Image (spheres, rainbow, N blue to C red):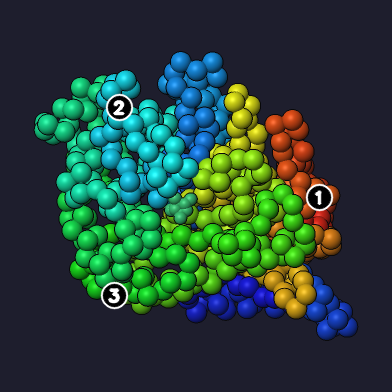
């Protein structure tokens, strides 16, 4: 039996939860209690004292100049036969609007620290070509640059998250990019923007000061990066009404010393609003990885064991941040996360093209539930990556497009955006494999401005349906509707030939009695319940 409780800070809230657990236990007769406590799966929801707002930006995405994420996947150019708007393919655009993309990170990744923004502006025919040294050594013609990216964010109705080049660029270059984008003053740089067809400045919310500067972004030490980041940040101005949310490069996974270095000194802390971390789930390590579609139960289990580790990692960074920033003015920005498998057979190893199965859907549910639960500190997160790369929400091939199981999870979870986290207490059975065990259920709950409660759940067990009771304390349960994403096969996935093998269905396997919902979750499933 595993117990997880959403972290609470006040004494009053601790008492409320204990009371709620006690109350819900009283639903069982004395004789039942001792036996059932071992078997019962229960998610208590405290609905009358909502916690922090779940930042919509936890549901962010990432588009790098890598493989066919941008070229082919998003950008086809205005001359393409594929229906497009200003060169951006319509099918992908319309699908992305459905999941309410809140922010989009660009142009990398490792690519960002080799990117020189002036290569990607001005008439297409005069743009410089470069070689994409990190990703397949292909020639990049820069036909997708600043104006095209900003147009994409406009069409999606999302915030831009631009990753500046600290690794191989200059302070002046990054400072002028911010000026080009956001300044309304008259200067050579803003005149250049106007010559390129944009009279008024854009708004840019998120700005990363380098990417993975401990690795592909310059192989720096934490102290060296802290110093150089301070220098860059000094010159990244807030022009007019544009206030940058500056994101300092943080470490990979649980390399907590880097976070300590950036957080401990107030004058360093003052230079950023967010601290990034990256974490990928890589089955059997970077030298092996596993296949995205051909896997057994060991790899299924191992994937989720690795996914759950994001909770420990976030807690570790939070502890450090809480020590130096108890008022929580700095956000944790998990701007790369997801499963990383070996590429599909026959594809360019540098393009990181992988299929996406029901396993990835459960991975997404585990991560998004954990991010929700850490809404007090996690303010931004970006799935890697949006189209055709790693754990993508969309795959394309010429004029065809498929929505992946991960896409469907983002859609099922989208109403968590800007809702308030509800305190929950989850007691559930373990999912065991060999000598290891992990919680069989992942869950989170929120309430939106209209009072609608969204509960999102995943049953990780591939061969066992699980009955979960959900007492809702402090709100009446008048109606419940549900959606489920599941399949008979652990590796169910959509292909260009069969694009709807796995998609959400209406879920009715629950009953409601006296404010308690009893749900039968199918094995290997993601379930979303809307409670009114
Ligand atoms: O997402 C792929 C790569 O993974 C990114 O370019 C880099 O930041 C990370 O190592």
How packed is label 3: few (under 14 Cα within 10 Å), some, or many (20 or more)?
some
Give how far across and how far down residue 294 sits, in percent: 74, 52
State the residue lying farthest toward the right.
31
In the image: residue 235, left or right of residue 524: left
Q: Which mark is residue 127?
A: 2
Residue denoted by label 1? 489
Tell me which residue sits at (78%, 75%) in the image: 434
Nearer the observer, 171 or 325: 171
Q: Nearer the viewer, mark 3 or mark 2?
A: 2
Q: Nearer the viewer, mark 2 or mark 1?
A: 2
Q: In terms of secondary structure, where does tag 3 sit?
A: helix
| Residue 434 can be seen in this image | yes
| Residue 422 can be seen in this image | no
- Do callouts 2 and 1 mark residues in contact (Cβ within 8 Å)? no
Nearer the observer, 479 or 377: 377
Residue denoted by label 3? 264
Q: In terms of secondary structure, where does tag 1 sit?
A: loop
Nearer the observer, 169 or 63: 169
Marks 3/2: CA distance? 43 Å
Residue at mark 2: C-beta within 8 A of ligand 1: no
Give how far across and how far down residue 445 sits, in percent: 61, 58
How packed is label 1: few (under 14 Cα within 10 Å), some, or many (20 or more)?
few
Q: Earlier in the sequence, mark 3 or mark 1?
A: 3
State the residue lying farthest toward the left.
187
């Amino acid at each position: 039996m595993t117990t997880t409780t959403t972290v609470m800070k006040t004494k009053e809230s601790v008492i409320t939860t204990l009371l709620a657990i006690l109350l819900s236990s009283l639903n069982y007769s004395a004789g039942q209690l001792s036996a059932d406590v071992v078997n019962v799966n229960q998610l208590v929801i405290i609905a009358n004292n909502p916690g922090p707002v779940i930042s919509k930006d936890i549901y962010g995405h990432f588009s790098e100049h890598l493989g066919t994420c941008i070229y082919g996947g998003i950008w086809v150019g205005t001359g393409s036969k594929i229906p497009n708007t200003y060169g951006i393919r319509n099918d992908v655009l319309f699908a992305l609007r459905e999941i309410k993309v809140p922010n989009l990170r660009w142009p990398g990744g490792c690519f960002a620290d080799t990117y020189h923004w002036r290569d990607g502006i001005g008439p297409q025919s005069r743009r410089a070509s470069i070689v994409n040294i990190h990703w397949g050594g292909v020639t990049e013609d820069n036909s997708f640059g600043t104006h095209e990216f900003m147009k994409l964010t406009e069409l999606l109705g999302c915030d831009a998250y631009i990753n500046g080049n600290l690794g191989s660029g200059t302070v002046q270059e990054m400072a002028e990019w911010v000026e080009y984008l956001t300044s309304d003053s008259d200067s050579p740089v803003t005149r250049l923007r106007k010559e390129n067809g944009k009279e008024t400045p854009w708004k840019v919310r998120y700005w990363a000061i380098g990417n993975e500067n401990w690795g592909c972004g310059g192989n720096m030490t934490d102290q060296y990066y802290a110093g150089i980041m301070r220098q860059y940040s000094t010159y990244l101005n807030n022009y007019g009404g544009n206030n940058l949310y500056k994101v300092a490069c943080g470490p990979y996974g649980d390399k907590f010393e880097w976070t300590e270095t950036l957080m401990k000194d107030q004058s360093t802390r003052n230079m950023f609003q967010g601290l990034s971390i990256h974490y990928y789930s890589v089955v059997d390590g970077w030298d092996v990885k596993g296949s995205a579609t051909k896997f057994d139960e060991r790899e299924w289990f191992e994937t989720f064991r690795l996914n759950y580790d994001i909770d420990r990692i976030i807690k570790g960074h939070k502890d450090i941040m809480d020590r130096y920033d108890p008022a929580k003015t700095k956000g944790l920005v998990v701007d790369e996360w997801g499963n990383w498998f070996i590429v599909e057979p026959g594809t360019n190893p540098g393009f990181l093209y992988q299929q996406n199965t029901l396993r990835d859907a459960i991975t997404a549910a585990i991560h998004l539930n954990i991010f929700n639960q850490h809404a007090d500190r996690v303010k931004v997160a970006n799935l890697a990556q949006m189209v055709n790369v790693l754990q993508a929400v969309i795959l394309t091939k010429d004029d065809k497009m498929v929505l992946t199981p991960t896409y469907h999870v983002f859609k099922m979870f989208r109403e968590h955006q800007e809702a308030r986290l509800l305190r929950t207490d989850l007691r559930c059975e373990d999912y065991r494999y060999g000598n290891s065990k992990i919680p069989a259920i992942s869950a989170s709950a929120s309430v939106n401005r209209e009072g609608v409660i969204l509960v999102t759940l995943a049953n990780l067990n591939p061969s066992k349906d699980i009955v979960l009771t959900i007492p809702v304390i402090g709100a009446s349960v008048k109606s419940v509707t549900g959606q489920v994403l599941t399949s008979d096969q652990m590796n169910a996935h959509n292909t260009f030939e069969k694009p709807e093998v796995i998609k959400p269905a209406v879920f009715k396997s629950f009953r409601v009695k006296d404010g308690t919902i009893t749900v039968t979750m199918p094995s290997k499933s993601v379930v979303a319940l809307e409670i009114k």
